[in-house]
Amino acid sequence: MSAEQNGVDYDVVIIGGGPAGAVAAAGLVREGRKVAVFEKETFPRFVIGESLLPSSNDILSRVGLYDAVADAKFLKKEGALFFMDGKIERFNFAETSAGGWDFAYQVPRADFDSVLINKAASMGADVTFGAAVTGVAFDDDTVTLTVRQGQVDRTVTGKWLIDCSGYGRALASNLDLDAPSTLPVREALFTHITGDRRPAGSDEGYIWIVVLPQGGWIWVIPFSDGRTSVGVVAEPSLFVSDTESDAQLLTRLLTQEPCLAERLGDMRFVMETRRIKGYSVGIKSLHGPRYLLTGNATEFLDPVFSSGVTLAMESAHRAQAMVNRALNGETVDFDAEYDAYVMRGVNCFRSYVTSWYTGELKSLFFNATKPEKIKRRVCSVLAGYVWDLNNPFAAQSGEALAATFATIADPRKGAVGG
């Protein structure tokens, strides 16, 4: 039964027009659903999370958004380079155990998000910008949203609600779903620059992750328009300075490493420096009666492995599939088929984030004698294939990593077990 026949405005209402909202909307309109997306901001707008993973291309392809992204000519990202204590470790996405896509994209999110949501709108989604959801109510058959545009409030009804509000966490705040993160508080200081002396050829698109000796790490993410995103992530104490501005502090931290002093020696800031503190957050539940939460509206871990957009799009794709089945009258076990599925990917990335900051994962990355099989399996996770049940470093990430760490001998001997 269509939305109109059921006496509601839409089959599905979606809060948020970022990548998760666009994926959910595109997937549902391809199934013939009447969909509304309410986005409180006006696009294009700045947001962090600019380095994609190859698995994201799978999701974009499944919902009809990939061609629009490819046409936008974003810079291709074929892998990641990690730097620590003069050592370099390369992960090439063509060398994974999962197969799959061998590249992703480096994307200014203002442009990327606009491409996605505009394409979803052209496919038939009813997208409204500048529309903040200020209230949500549920009954047995419908969900009712209060939407504010300017100074005007209106009500919108639907059969299901998907929360793709990201950092806005619309439902989490309305329904008291926030939970403390299990990760320590960290801070990010970042900006965009020009004047980046990039490597030549396909290496241009690699993300650089540089470990700081005093703790924390640096990202370097190049874009196709000549700008580069640079930032530092560390414990908040690293960013305390009585004598430096944020721009001076960021410049000093970026250029203290020899590899970056060369690359960024001529950099010019083209955006005001920004800070984000205490960004990791948890959630009590991923679903409830007639609603599901996706992406950063559920849990956000850490930017080190660029997992945010991947988790957002994967969970949104899963959410729209579950909602579509429910609209078809099927019985859906949301605990097993949605929550458990999404959290399997979240917890896989959590294992890698945790072991990165304890130092164990860095020891593995920079161990010259690690078996190629292990590197390929880890590379599959770094490519976003965290739901690959054939890869123990994804399916049983905690156990697989712990067993591997246990085989690492004295780092000065450079031995690791097979």
Image (spheres, rainbow, N blue to C red):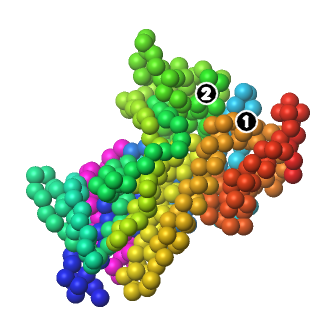
List the residue tagged with mark 1.
88
Q: Which residues are magenta?
A: 25-46
Inspect this view and state whether residue 139 appears: yes
Residue 4 position in % (x across, y down): 21, 83
- Which residue does the image show at 79% across and 50% down from the upper left? 403
Quick check: can you spot residue 204?
Answer: no
Q: Where residue 198 sits in the image (x, y, percent)?
A: 59, 36
> Is 172 inside the magenta-drawn segment?
no
The label number, if any, that marks residue 215 in the structure image: 2
Most foreground residue, 16 or 199:
16
Callout 2 environment at 10 Å: few (<14), some (14 to 19), or many (20+)?
A: few
Name the residue rendered at 42%, 72% in the picture: 320
- Point out residue 295 in the picture as x, y percentages from the top left corner: 45, 57
Q: Quadrant of residue 213?
A: top right
Q: Amino acid at mark 1?
A: Ile
Disc assigned to residue 363: none
Q: Which residue is painted at 46% across and 79% down in the image?
A: 332
Which residue reaches farthest left? 151
The residue sitting at 43% across, 49% down in the picture is: 179
Q: CA distance from mark 1 to mark 2?
A: 17 Å
Graded by Cα atoms within 10 Å as few (under 14), some (14 to 19) or many (20 or more), the crowding at tag 1 reads few
Q: Along the line of sight, which residue is nearer the eye, 282 or 368? A: 282
102 vs 400, left or right, is left
Residue 270 appears at what percent x and percent y? 40, 31
